[in-house]
Amino acid sequence: MKLKYSLKMENDKNTILEAFVKTFIQKHKAERALWELTHPLKRNNFTNKLNHGWENIFRMQHLLQVPREQDDEKSIQKLLGFKNTEICYVISNYGDYDDGFFEFEEAFTDLYWRGFASVIMNISATKFFLKTEQVQGAPPKFIGKAPNNF
């Protein structure tokens, strides 16, 4: 269930997006990425890049691909260190989740099994889960962590 926005959450959303972009998006793509994420009519440009071209926008040194033997819900949650009730912000191709605040368990349990890409991040934007589009077989999944969180 999408959490109701408060004015504080709306302000926090901009801070979260700025921190996410500054930390995880390649420097020469950061300004454009932030603009796309903060403009509703352009947001799908960014979410589509999560499906095709994610390796061209992220600072790959901050991403750890989830090993096949740990590619299950419990292992990924352990790698992230998120609690079930932790409030997270979501960037997704799915409108029922995109641009919303959710408890981790709710968003992760559903988005983990869907076919298109999603990012589920903590509200300090220091850690996130990235699931890319499923084309054939299991889609690549990544844990993103700010440099001081590795």
Image (cartoon, rainbow, N blue to C red):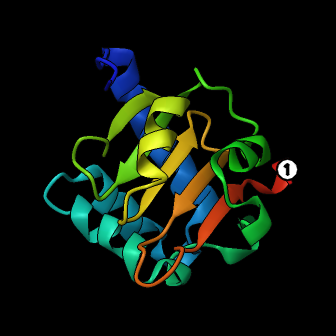
Position in image of residue 8 (x %, y %) = 39, 17
Determine crowd level at label 1: few under 14, some 14-19, many 20+ residues with C-alpha closer than 10 A: few
Position in image of residue 96 (x %, y %) = 24, 41
Residue closest to the eye, 120 or 109? 109
Total numbered labels: 1
User: What residue is disc 1 on?
Assistant: 148
- Left or right: where 86 falls relative to 48: right
Which residue is pictured at 66% across the width and 54% down the height? 72
For the N terminus, the quadrant is top left
For the C terminus, the quadrant is bottom right
Vertical position of residue 60 compared to residue 81: above or below? below
Asked which secondary structure carries label 1, the reply is helix
Question: Which residue of the protein is positioned furthest toward the left in this rendering?
Answer: 41
Residue closest to the eye, 33 or 76? 76
- Left or right: where 76 falls relative to 2: right
Residue closest to the eye, 25 or 65? 65
Q: Amino acid at mark 1?
A: Asn
Q: Is residue 68 visible?
A: yes
Vertical position of residue 140 compared to residue 149: above or below? below
Vertical position of residue 14 compared to residue 39: above or below? above
Q: Quadrant of residue 5?
A: top left
Vertical position of residue 95 compared to residue 114: above or below? above
Q: Quadrant of residue 136?
A: bottom left
Which residue is pictured at 33% across the width and 67% down the height? 46
Position in image of residue 114 (x %, y %) = 38, 57
Position in image of residue 87 (x %, y %) = 53, 25
